[in-house]
Image (cartoon, rainbow, N blue to C red):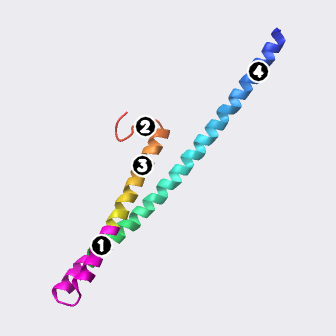
Amino acid sequence: TNKESSTRHKINKQSTLLALEDIKDQTRRNYDSATQELEYLLRLDELYQERLEQSQEQIRIAEERYRLGMIQLLELDKTRTEYIDSNIQYNANRYQIIKKQEELNHMLSQKILGKW
């Protein structure tokens, strides 16, 4: 009857509102988590950049030592390999930063990679 229909409507409305609140809470938690992950990745970026700079300096030193005959070619190549590894780690982290920033942009309905 009409009274039952009204009661069902109220229950459905309350259920929908509760579901909406759950979605809003989950979205807030996802946003907070993504923001914290981005902050962590940005701190890592600084460390990887320092490591990359140190690796570049190590190559310069190793090349000079090789030129002077103080080390073998194998040791020079090892130094170069360490630089390549540092560069890969740095760029992989940069990719993760961009990916996380775009995830946040998507959550906030902002441009992704500068486009709508």
Mark identifier at residue 110: 2
Q: Secondary structure at mark 4?
A: helix
Q: Is residue 48 above or below residue 12?
A: below
User: Looking at the picture, which amino acid does disc 3 mark?
Assistant: Lys
Q: Secondary structure at mark 3?
A: helix
In the picture of the structure, the residue carrying the numbered disc 3 is 99
Q: Residues within 10 Å of mark 3 (few under 14, many from 20)?
A: some
Measure the alpha-carbon separation of dots 1 and 3: 27 Å
Callout 1–callout 4 Cβ contact below 8 Å: no
Measure the alpha-carbon separation of dots 2 and 3: 14 Å
The answer to which image quadrant residue 92 occupies is bottom left
In the picture of the structure, the residue carrying the numbered disc 4 is 10
The answer to which image quadrant residue 87 occupies is bottom left
User: Looking at the picture, which amino acid does disc 1 mark?
Assistant: Thr
Q: Residues within 10 Å of mark 2 (few under 14, many from 20)?
A: some
SS majority, magenta: helix
Q: Is residue 86 magenta?
A: no
Callout 3–callout 4 Cβ contact below 8 Å: no
Residue 19, given in percent of the width and then of the height, sits at 68, 32
- From this viewpoint, which residue is outermost toward the bottom? 70
The answer to which image quadrant residue 65 occupies is bottom left
Q: Earlier in the sequence, mark 4 or mark 2?
A: 4
Q: Is residue 76 magenta?
A: yes
Q: Earlier in the sequence, mark 3 or mark 4?
A: 4
Q: Residues within 10 Å of mark 1 (few under 14, many from 20)?
A: some
Q: Earlier in the sequence, mark 1 or mark 2?
A: 1
